[in-house]
């Protein structure tokens, strides 16, 4: 377990440094890395410190949030399909963020944007819990997710179409697919407080999630306060996913792919899956963000496109395996 | 002899017909923000019965005050048809279906090309003067513009390097009107150095590395968009702080009209500030 977390840390660190070295400006490896710590303001140091560094840091933060939220929601709902993107939580937070931006609420205070996205995400999680229920089947979970996702995406598109800004409508793609292009430390600072609260709430449920895997009655008899666990995951996931979506758009499949790959390495312990998925999510998002810049430089290929290409086959694999299990 | 007479008669008839059809149209509708600006600058307000909803937008139109209290359209064929215009002015990128429909309904539609050069702008202005029956006004405007252009200060060999930067990190290349505004004001466009003849995406990284002497930024619109966020990126703010002044690419830059001279004048002020440093 420690070994797994250690190797994931090494992987995240490697990808983080690689992410810093990838970009349209042609800068040598040593020059880039030394410019990262340079104190004088040169074009190279500006590129490294103000463009690439915040992008790589946001990549880690967003990946961490999505991996963690995915693993926690799956543990709570005891369903491997419970992923923020699939069950509509990301789409709902995008709606929250877009509403805050277009109404001007986001300008009012710095926390308005991530908090509005959080509210959108929380509404979606509550709806999922009500519609699919704690014992709901995969079918009801997916149906509820599709409904919430479709409605949120439609409302987001509507709001963007009604905006007086001529560029807003062309950004429907960003809100659906996500991108880290041209973000800055302003965005890091904007979402970090909300994200950290989310991470802490989610990580506080590690033990309860392990107990919960034995069934609710056993968990209660082991002293797990179920409602506290449920609320922590609800608010924690909403905060993590909401803050991520507010600055990077809705990026799907990370919370599906990462826990799925890592589950066997943590001995199928839902609690232990949480820190592993967090690191795995960060690694996967950094890798995807490197891929979008290497494959189509200058085109701002959306992260969601890469994630769907990786995630969709896995989704199919899950379906086939689930069907075999039923037979 | 008979044939000569009949030929002369038919020529006279033809000339008469042309003069009749060339009589200034009294009910003109514009479906394009640039065509109505040319028409308004030619003093044709009394002929205009409708302009686009952008005509009074000071961000888009350099003669917005002239368009005040004119009825507006949103470029839809039905609403324009119902106005019963004698003539419709449209741009190259006006919805082609709408233009075709109006033509099928027997309405005279004149389509103007996008002016990517001063030369194309001149041609558009002359064409507008002809279709509106305001040739003299068009010649006057062009004469004034030519005098103003001729009076521009000479371009130095060591021209400062300027970057055109709009929402989404878009920049204009050498065959854009804004490029000609830049070069006439004595600047070099960094898009040309970077091989972006047709314009396109210029990443923030490339912009910072190019380290321009001047920066001309796209204007902002109400509401919010991620596309415009880039114009407030910290590296761009850092760049702006280093430079004497940031010019906003406003309504004088949008369309090919004689008002581009105002954009050039502002750039020349900026060039003087840079050169005095």
Image: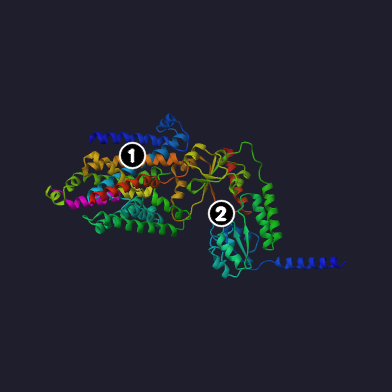
**Magenta part of the protein: which range?**
A223-239
Which subunit holds the residue at mark 2?
B
Asked if residue B69 is among those painted magenta in the image, a careful observer would answer no
Asked if the stretch drawn in magenta spans residue A230, the answer is yes
Q: Helix, strand, or loop for circle 2?
A: helix
Outermost residue to the left: A221
The residue that appears at 31% across and 44% down in the rendered structure is A257
What is the chief secondary structure element of the magenta stretch? helix
Q: Which mark is residue B251?
A: 2
Q: In the rendering, which numbered label is found on residue A224?
A: none
Q: Residue lying farthest front?
A: A327
Q: Is residue B111 left or right of residue B21?
A: left
User: Label 2 to label 1, Cα distance in Å?
Assistant: 46 Å
Residue B109: x and y in percent read 62, 63
Chain of the residue where label 1 is placed in the rendered structure: A
Q: Count how many numbered circles sit on residues in the image.
A: 2
Q: Which residue is mark 1?
A: A283
Label 2 or label 1, whichever lies nearer to me, is 1
């Amino acid at each position: 377990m420690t070994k797994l977390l250690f190797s994931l840390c090494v992987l995240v660190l490697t990808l983080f440094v690689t992410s810093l070295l990838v970009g349209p400006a042609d800068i040598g490896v040593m020059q880039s890395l030394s410019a990262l710590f340079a104190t004088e303001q040169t074009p190279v140091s500006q590129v490294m410190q103000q463009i690439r560094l915040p992008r790589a840091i946001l990549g880690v933060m967003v990946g961490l949030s999505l991996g963690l939220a995915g693993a926690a929601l799956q543990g709570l709902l005891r369903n491997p399909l419970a992923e923020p993107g699939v069950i509509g939580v990301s789409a709902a937070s995008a709606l929250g963020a877009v509403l805050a931006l277009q109404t001007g609420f986001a300008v009012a205070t710095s926390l308005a944007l991530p908090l509005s996205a959080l509210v959108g995400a929380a509404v979606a999680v509550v709806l999922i819990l009500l519609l699919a229920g704690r014992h709901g089947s995969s079918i009801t979970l997916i149906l509820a997710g599709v409904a919430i996702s479709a409605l949120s995406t439609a409302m987001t598109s509507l709001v963007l179409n009604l905006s007086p800004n001529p560029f807003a409508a062309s950004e429907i793609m960003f809100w659906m697919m996500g991108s880290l292009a041209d973000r800055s430390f302003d965005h890091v600072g904007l979402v970090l407080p909300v994200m950290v609260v989310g991470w802490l709430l989610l990580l506080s449920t590690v033990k309860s999630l392990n107990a919960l895997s034995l069934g609710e009655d056993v968990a209660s008899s082991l002293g797990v306060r179920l409602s506290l666990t449920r609320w922590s995951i609800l608010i924690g996931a909403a905060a993590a996913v909401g803050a991520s979506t507010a600055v990077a758009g809705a990026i799907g499949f990370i919370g599906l792919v990462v826990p799925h790959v890592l589950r066997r390495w943590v001995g199928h312990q839902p609690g232990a899956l949480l820190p592993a998925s967090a690191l795995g999510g960060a690694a996967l998002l950094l890798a995807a963000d490197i891929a979008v810049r290497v494959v189509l430089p200058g085109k701002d290929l959306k992260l969601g496109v890469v994630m769907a290409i990786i995630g969709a086959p896995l989704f199919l694999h899950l379906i086939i395996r689930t069907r075999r299990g039923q037979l | 002899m008979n044939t000569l007479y009949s030929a002369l008669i038919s020529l006279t008839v033809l000339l008469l017909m042309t003069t009749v059809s060339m009589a200034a149209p009294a009910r003109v509708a514009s479906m394009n923000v640039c065509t109505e600006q040319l028409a308004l600058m030619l003093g044709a307000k009394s002929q205009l019965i409708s302009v686009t909803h952008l005509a009074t937008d000071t961000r888009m139109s350099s003669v917005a005050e002239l368009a005040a209290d004119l009825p507006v359209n949103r470029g839809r064929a039905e609403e324009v048809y119902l106005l019963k215009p004698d003539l419709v002015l449209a741009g190259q990128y006006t919805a082609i279906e709408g233009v075709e429909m109006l033509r099928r309904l027997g309405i005279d539609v004149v389509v103007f090309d996008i002016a990517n050069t001063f030369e194309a702008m001149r041609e558009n202005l002359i064409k507008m003067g002809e279709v509106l029956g305001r040739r003299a006004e068009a010649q006057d405007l062009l004469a004034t513009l030519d005098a103003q252009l001729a009076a521009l200060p000479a371009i130095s060999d060591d021209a400062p390097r300027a970057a055109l930067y709009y929402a989404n990190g878009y920049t204009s290349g050498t065959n854009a009107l804004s490029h000609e505004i830049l070069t006439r004001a004595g600047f070099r466009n960094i898009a040309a150095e970077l091989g972006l003849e047709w314009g396109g995406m210029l990443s923030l990284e490339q912009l910072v590395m190019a380290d321009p002497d001047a920066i001309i930024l796209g204007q902002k619109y109400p509401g919010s968009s991620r596309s415009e966020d880039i114009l407030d990126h910290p590296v761009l703010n850092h760049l702006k702080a280093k430079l004497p002044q940031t010019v906003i690419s406003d309504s004088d830059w949008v369309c090919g009209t004689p008002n581009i001279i105002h954009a050039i004048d502002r750039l020349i002020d900026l060039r003087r500030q840079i050169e005095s440093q």
